[in-house]
Image: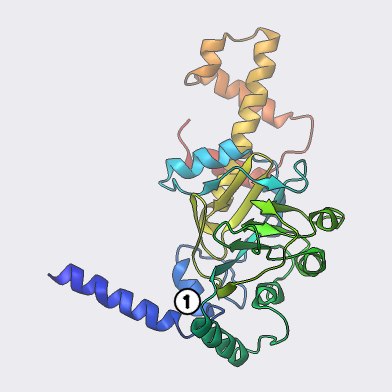
Amino acid sequence: MKRPFLLLLLLVIFFQVRAQFVGAPAEYVKSLTPEWKGERFPDGRPRVPDVLLERLKNVSIEEAWGYLRNRGYQNQFEGDWIVLHPDQPMTGRVVTAQYMPLRPDLEKIIREQGKKEGRTQQGGTNSWPIDVLIEGDIYVADSYGKIVDGTLIGDNLGNSIYARSKRGIIFYGSVRDQEGLEEIVGFNGWIKGSDPSYIQQMSLTAINVPVRIGRATVLPGDVVLAKKYGVIFIPAHLLADLVINAEVTALRDEFGHQRLREGKYKPGQIDSAWSDEIKKDFMNWLSKYPGKLPMSKEELDNYFKERNW
């Protein structure tokens, strides 16, 4: 009897706290991401380093997906997008927004709470998430797949988003003015549709709360890896390890392919657990790598110290 009562109590507390904000308080965001031990933004989101966001662009969707799945995170991918610029990958830190079909009494409460929080009262509430963006952020919205009359932004708001974040959007819903959005240099978007209608009968309910994006559960402060084949949402505390794992795997593949072309090893030797001879050869190959390695020597040394081949 104790466990159901405790669960009910926690749910009551959650909804009581949840009803008191549109933009989630920093302490609430911190409570969602306790495994992050680094710096945070004033809104509570993890402040992952910019250099990791840049390195993440070279990680494949499959590498990121495999890493997360092996650690129990099986619901972090969503595919089947319309991508404004498919050949331009995008990485960044998540700001979430949740939308629901409009209900007048709830909309009134949201407007009143937004006013208390200092949010602009002109125009629609769909501009509120844009106002909190900073450089490196990606605006991720659950607009429940609404296409007609569900267009969260057009090219005006798109320009505002890019001016603030130098990134773009991921909407489980739609946009208008797609042609104009595609003309914003540097801006990119992953959307479910486009329509000439304007937003109607929709209400923003929360900023920086957990949202569902198709198959994925997304938290504020997650890190996005968005490519033409899909989008992965990465918990901030796993990012550094995910990146270096993917980078070392890519280097191992490059080494293996080269040695196979040279005929030095047989496919079975490369595809199975490596012998001490191959490991030594790989480490020598790394020391003479013809380009710039993606990670520092210290990171590489720590990686091999902590892992069993």
Quadrant where the N terminus lies?
A: bottom left
Looking at the image, the residue that sits furthest to the left is 1
The x and y percentages for residue 64 are 56, 42
Question: Observer-nearest residue: 105 or 112?
Answer: 105
Q: Residue at x 44, y 72 (%)?
A: 31
Left or right of residue 43, residue 91 in this image: right
Q: From where the camera sits, is residue 229 visible?
A: yes
Q: Residue at x 53, y 46 (%)?
A: 77
The x and y percentages for residue 249 are 59, 32
Q: How is the image coloured?
A: rainbow
The x and y percentages for residue 179 are 83, 53
Amino acid, disc 1: Tyr
Question: Observer-nearest residue: 280 or 307?
Answer: 307
Q: From where the camera sits, is residue 305 visible?
A: no
Establish if 293 lies above or below 100.
above
Quadrant in the rendering for residue 222: bottom right
Q: Residue at x 63, y 47 (%)?
A: 298
Left or right of residue 15, residue 188 in this image: right
User: Could you say whether the residue bearing mark 1 is in a helix, strand or loop?
Assistant: helix
Q: Residue at x 78, y 62 (%)?
A: 166
- Tell me the residue that label 1 is attached to: 28
Establish if 89 lies above or below 288.
below
Question: Observer-nearest residue: 214 or 185?
Answer: 214
- How many numbered marks, from 0 up? 1
Is the residue marked by circle 1 packed among few (<14), some (14-19), or many (20+) residues within 10 Å? some
Quadrant in the rendering for residue 79: top right
The x and y percentages for residue 7 are 25, 70
